[in-house]
Each structure stands twice: as structure tokens, then as C-alpha cells.
Amino acid sequence: MLLLSPVPAFAADLSPEPAEPAPAVVTPYNWTGFYVGAHIGYGWGREHDTLRNTTLAEAMDRFDVNGVLGGIHGGYNQQFDGNFVVGLEADADLSGIQGNDHTAQAGGASRLDMRNRWQSSIRARVGYAFDRFLVYATGGMAIGDIRERWTILNGTLAGSSTKTRVGWTAGAGVEYAFDDHWVGRAEVRYTDFGKSNFTVGSGVRFKAGFHETVGLIGVSYKF
């Protein structure tokens, strides 16, 4: 009995200690997937035309344009092994970018107004992800309308014409994933819409177009 008495205490000392819980595994954010979103921004640039070559506006061939624009975007990203992300994105914007210039001549004062009412683009994107941060470059095709209105202020001649132009756009941006679905963005892009032929009034013919730099902020929902 004396030999057996310490056995329970000895057995209790050999009981295993409870295991500590394993640390949670943190999974890096994955950018692969479709997304849609909305954005708003401000654009500034210049109208450029060939009215200097006409007798009606020898001094009017370029002027500043600016305004607010905003719209929607959507696309798809694919993240490859590691941190590289490539994708394709399209957007469509309503635009308030506009400007004007005027000149006074012996025949009367004249004014040229330019307005862009909408624009869109389809672009490739190439980026590098730092977990929930994505830094990217983007570039592709841009399309938008250009409305030129010519007015002789003494009322003898007036007219307007609207054309749709296809140009190019390129820029860069950064995105941050707040959670698995909501992503914020900031982007800057340069766009050149080239020039189109315009005829306004009584046979006033010239070429005109515009280029812009746009700063945008937006939010996207990733599926």
C-alpha cells in the first residue's frame, strides 16, 4: 500500500499541458476578379485649331479649356504568381469641359466656343500589388465629342458643328482595397483627341481638337 500510494500524484504530473491555439494565417489580398465603380474628377487642357489660317480669326487658334467630368467604369484584373497584376478597363463619362476665345476685327468681333459633352475609353492596365495597395499604369483608346460654335457678334454669321473624335490616353494611378470588395482609387491621365474638320457659318472651314489632363478619384466594387 505504501508503494502504490504515490502513483496517482505521479500520474497527474505526467498529464499533457493544453496546446496553445495556432496563430491565424493572414492571406494576402488577391486582385483577380471583375469590378464596377464610379468616379469623378476635373480636367484641364487646350483647344487647338487652324483658324489662324482664315481671314475671320487671325489671332484665334488655341485657348484653355477645363471643367468637371464623371461617370462609371468596369473591368477585370488578373493577378499572377507574385505581385504582378494585368487587366482591361472601360469607362464612360459625362463631361463639362469647355472654353472659348474671341477677337475683334474690322468686320466685327467674333467668338469661338468649344465644348466636350461626353468621353469614353478602353484601356489596358499593368500594375504591381503591395498586398492591398496596387500601383498601376494604364493606356489605350479614347473617344469623345467636340462641339465648335462660331459667332460673329454683330449677328451676320453664326453656326456650330459637332464631331466625334478617336484619340489616345495614358496615365497612372493607385488603388487601395478597404476590404474584400470595396476598392478606392486615384488616377491621373493625359488624353489627346486629335483634330477634325469643321464647317460653320457660311463656309468657314477649319480643323479643331483638344487635349486634356484629368485627375480622378473613385470607388469600385470587386466581385
Image (tube, rainbow, N blue to C red):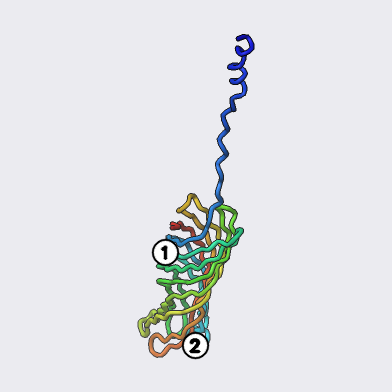
Q: Earlier in the sequence, mark 1 or mark 2?
A: 2
Label 1 sits on what residue type?
Answer: Ile
Decide: few, some or many residues near mark 1? Use Cα within 10 Å; few <14, some 14-19, many ≥20.
some
Q: Quadrant of residue 40?
A: bottom left
Decide: few, some or many residues near mark 2? Use Cα within 10 Å; few <14, some 14-19, many ≥20.
some
Label 2 sits on what residue type?
Answer: Thr
Disc 2 element = loop
Disc 1 element = strand
User: Depth check: 177 or 157 in front?
Assistant: 177
Residue 12 at x, y = what percent? 59, 20
The disc placed on residue 54 is 2
Residue 156 at x, y = what percent? 36, 85
Residue matched to label 1: 72
**In this rendering, the label closer to the viewer, 1 or 2:** 1
Residue at the extreme top? 2
Q: Is residue 149 left or right of residue 172?
A: left
Residue at the extreme front? 1
Say whether residue 86 is visible. Answer: yes
